[in-house]
């Protein structure tokens, strides 16, 4: 049990520091001190910072998407599923609070992103998200809730809109990009309605 507690402490410490300081500016010694363990203990559990980050990403981001699989299996209408999916993405973003702007840095930072374990985790996340969206859209088209169309194309279009909306809503665009709109005023209900107006039968 003690090993599991130590591991969890290091995961929590790493997650907190990655969000606060960014991946590149977080050192293994910082994580060790935050977790209350020795630097050697961190390496005993995680051979590199890259592998630790990959595990943080898997446990803190990917694992939450188990809720979506339950949503897909539910008996509610496709429209309600899509609304709940969008709400889930909003909730998932909000949990990062003021540190959300650090996520692009965490994911794209050079040595971390080159790590195969992280690449697989990110790939798994994108596949899971797309398959969930596609399943909802396909169901909605089949039962007449959504307009007949190529379900994969519609799913990709809705996902693209959702992702871009989230980037603007939570100020995650690269700093070099001009802030053309004040997305903070937009609500997810308005976004959802805009999407539905385009695909509802």
Image: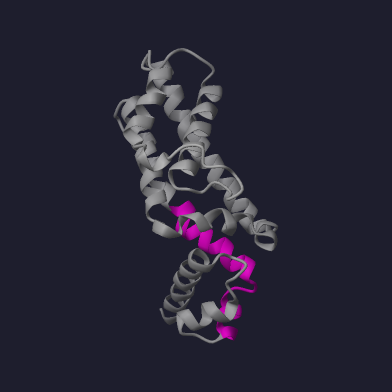
Q: Residue at x 59, y 65 (%)?
A: 23
Q: Which residues are magenta?
A: 39-63
Q: Residue at x 36, y 47 (%)?
A: 91
Residue 50: quadrant of the picture? bottom right
Q: Is residue 185 left or right of residue 111?
A: left
181 drawn magenta:
no
46 drawn magenta:
yes
* Number of marks: 0
- Rendered position, 114 above or below 10: above
Q: Residue furthest left?
A: 76
Q: Is residue 162 left or right of residue 74?
A: right
Q: Quadrant of the N terminus?
A: bottom left
Q: Residue at x 46, y 37 (%)?
A: 181
Q: Residue at x 63, y 58 (%)?
A: 117
Task: Tell me the chief SS of the magenta region.
Answer: helix
Give the x, y percent position of residue 137: 44, 25
């Amino acid at each position: 049990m003690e090993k599991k507690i130590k591991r969890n402490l290091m995961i929590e410490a790493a997650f907190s520091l990655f969000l606060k300081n960014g991946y590149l500016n977080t050192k293994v010694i910082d994580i060790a001190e935050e977790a209350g363990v020795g630097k050697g203990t961190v390496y005993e559990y995680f051979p590199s910072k890259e592998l630790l980050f990959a595990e943080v990403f898997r446990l803190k981001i990917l694992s939450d998407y188990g809720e979506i699989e339950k949503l897909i299996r539910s008996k509610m209408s496709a429209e309600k599923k899509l609304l709940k999916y969008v709400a889930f993405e909003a909730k998932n973003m909000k949990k990062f609070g003021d540190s959300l702007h650090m996520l692009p840095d965490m994911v794209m930072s050079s040595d971390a992103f080159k790590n195969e374990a992280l690449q697989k985790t990110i790939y798994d996340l994108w596949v899971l998200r797309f398959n969930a969206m596609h399943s909802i859209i396909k169901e909605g088209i089949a039962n007449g809730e959504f307009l007949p169309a190529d379900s994969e194309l519609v799913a990709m279009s809705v996902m693209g809109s959702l992702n871009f909306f989230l980037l603007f809503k939570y100020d995650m665009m690269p700093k070099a990009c001009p802030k053309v709109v004040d997305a903070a005023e937009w609500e997810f209900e308005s976004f959802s309605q805009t999407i539905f107006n385009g695909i509802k039968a």
